[in-house]
Structure formats: structure tokens, C-alpha cells
Amino acid sequence: MSQLAELTIDCVERGASIGFMLPLTKERALDFWRRVAKTIDQGRRLILVAEDALGICGTVQLVMDLADNQPHRADLVKLQVHSRARRRGLGEALMREAERYARLDGKTLLVLDAVTDGDAARLYERIGWTRVGDIPNFALFPDGRPCSTTFYYRDLG
């Protein structure tokens, strides 16, 4: 779990708006991953993890446990790629694997959000996700500046 926490800290320190503010302590990051682990153990969430020679370098999650009227859908959340592994296709590979696992679980629709016009948003558009719209000032960057969020979906049917 320590490597997952270090991955999250690396992403947040480089400006990723993934739900955390600076400074992000190791204990806070570990608490987050402990909570995630509980939902995985309960079958409510799936996590994919990528490793390189130095350890964990990427992850993405599928939230599978949604409302009763949404059994066909999952939320894709917290795509994280370590700074040492960026611009090598890892983000795309994690996204493709998440889509594959969602299909295997019978999901036909995925939904996610990203910082408007950020690196992740460009990735999602490049690999075929459909942009729905933007909400200004939806969240904050880790340094406290407001950022717009863009919502996307992927039809897996």
C-alpha cells in the first residue's frame, strides 16, 4: 500500500486534481488507499495496477457498485500515472484494460470526469471517449486554484 500512496503523492505534487490538496502527507494517502481496499474486498470496486522495475507506476479504478437502476454502468476514477512513467502509453493501456474488465463484468457504459483540457482529458478524447460538457469551477487543483471539470462517457455496447 505504501507504493500506491507514493504514486498518489507524486501525482498530486505535480498538480493532478484527483481529490487531494497540498500538502498531501503519506498518512493521508495511506488512509485513502485503506478505504479503497475495503471497497475492493467488498466487490464494490476494481483496481488495476501497473508496475515497472521500480515498483507501482500507475493505477485506475472502476467503481462497480452503483444504484440499483444502473447495473449496466461503472464509474472510472483516479487514473494515476507516476511522473517517471508518463508519455509512454501507460495511461492508455490502463484505460483499455479498465474497459476490457468492465465489459467482462457486463458493463455497457462507463462515465468519468477530468480537468477540462488537461492531459487526462486529451487522452480520453484521443482514445474515443465522448465529451459531454464542462462545469466551471467544479473542483480545485491541489494548490487551491479552481478548475473546470469535463464529463465523458464510453459506450461499450
Image (spheres, rainbow, N blue to C red):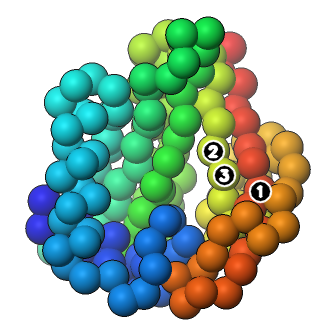
Determine which of the numbered discs, if any, sits on residue 113 in the image.
3
Determine which of the numbered discs, if any, sits on residue 71 in the image.
none
Q: Earlier in the sequence, mark 1 or mark 2?
A: 2
Q: What amino acid type should be assigned to the residue bearing mark 3?
A: Asp
Q: What amino acid type should be assigned to the residue bearing mark 2?
A: Leu
Q: Tell me if label 3 and label 2 are in contact, CB under 8 Å.
A: yes
At x 42%, y 87%, the residue is 22
Determine which of the numbered discs, if any, sits on residue 112 in the image.
2
- Name the spot of residue 94 as percent of width and height, x first: 44, 48
When the figure is inspected, residue 68 is found, relative to residue 137, above or below; the finding is above
Q: Earlier in the sequence, mark 1 or mark 3?
A: 3
Element type where label 2 sits in the image: strand
Q: Can residue 142 be seen in this snapshot?
A: yes
- Name the spot of residue 91 as percent of width and height, x first: 49, 58
Cα gap from disc 1 to disc 3, whole angstroms: 5 Å
At x 25%, y 82%, the residue is 25
Residue 48 relative to residue 75: left or right: left
Q: Can residue 53 be seen in this snapshot?
A: no
Q: Quadrant of residue 144?
A: bottom right
Q: Residues within 10 Å of mark 3 (few under 14, many from 20)?
A: many
Residue 126 relative to residue 66: left or right: right
Q: Quadrant of the N terminus?
A: bottom left
Looking at the image, how many numbered discs can be counted on the residues? 3
Q: Quadrant of the C terminus?
A: top right
Q: Residues within 10 Å of mark 2 (few under 14, many from 20)?
A: many
- Residue where numbered disc 1 is placed: 150
